Image: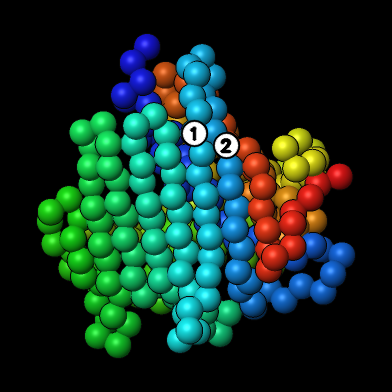
Amino acid sequence: MSLRPTLPALASSLLLSFALHPAVMADEPSDVTALKPFKASYTADMRRVPVNGEASHQLEQNADGSWTLTFHAAMFVARMTETSNLVLEDGVVKPLSYRYERRGLGRSRDTRQHFDWDAGTVTGMHRDRSIALETEPGLLDKTSYQLALQRDLMAGKETLHYRVVDGRSIDEYEFEVTGSKRVSTEVGDFDAVEVVRVRDADANRQTTLWFAKDWDYLLVRLQQIESDGQDYQIMLKEATIDGIQVRGD
């Protein structure tokens, strides 16, 4: 089996999930309106094919009060980086800019987006073509929506809808809470809520995510099954939240 076509699918799984922001343990007071700096790393594996993939994700506050969310993944001979600059206004995640870079395997790509909320526009470039869209309330980019999803889980929501700038268009992203499961990772076991990506009836890809209830819904596992039956999985390797080490039971 060739490894080359598998990179985009596995990368999509990684990009889907790593930005989900951990906060504090549930037995301590938790402020859903606040963002907290964090660092997290994950490992990736692909059943039937030996894969050594790793990814890191980090949320940092800037001097001006905005936040920068950075994701970096490396697998095979390819690397990618996603960066979103954002603010939190009245408890709502609001993107300011977004950049995606992928290098390796002859599939290099750049995407840049700038959100001008005063002018009501989203401009930039995607695959060498210009972006020209109108903003709308709640509009997110492909990284910041994941922060919004995590915060909605913290607020107890079970049906999750997002309007996301994806390439040169605005797409609907939908998720649904489907149950609970005990998940084992390198840093311990977690009681997790299970969430699935809702897709069109004719879509063959299945994506399931698990978030640790006792760590404000930190992502601890993701599984994606492709139309050809290939099974990808990512697992939590380590994480810190405001300098506090994440540990399971």
- Type of residue at label 1? Gly
The residue at 67%/47% (across/down) is 238
* Camera sees residue 232: no
Residue 170, given in percent of the width and then of the height, sits at 31, 60
Q: Nearer the viewer, residue 223 or 50?
A: 50
Provide the secondary structure element on which disc 1 rests. Answer: strand
Q: Residue at x 18, y 60 (%)?
A: 125
Q: Earlier in the sequence, mark 2 or mark 1?
A: 2
Q: Is residue 133 left or right of residue 224?
A: left
Above or below — where is 191 with respect to 225?
Answer: below
**Cα distance in 3D space between marks 2 and 1:** 6 Å
The x and y percentages for residue 159 are 60, 56
Do callouts 2 and 1 mark residues in contact (Cβ within 8 Å)? yes
Q: Which residue is mark 2?
A: 43
Q: Which residue occupies 52% across, 76% down?
A: 61
Q: Nearer the viewer, residue 1 or 160?
A: 1
Q: Amino acid at mark 2?
A: Thr
Name the quadrant containing residue 213: bottom right
* Horizontal arrangement in the rendering, residue 125 relative to residue 206 (left or right): left
Residue 70 visible? The answer is: yes
Of residues 209 and 43, the one nearer the viewer is: 43
* Helix, strand or loop at mark 2: strand
Q: Is residue 233 left or right of residue 99?
A: right
110 is higher (above) or lower (below) than 50: below
User: How dense is the environment of label 1, judged by Cα within 10 Å: few (below 14), some, or many (20 and up)?
Assistant: some
Q: Quadrant of residue 217?
A: bottom right
Residue identifier under label 1: 53
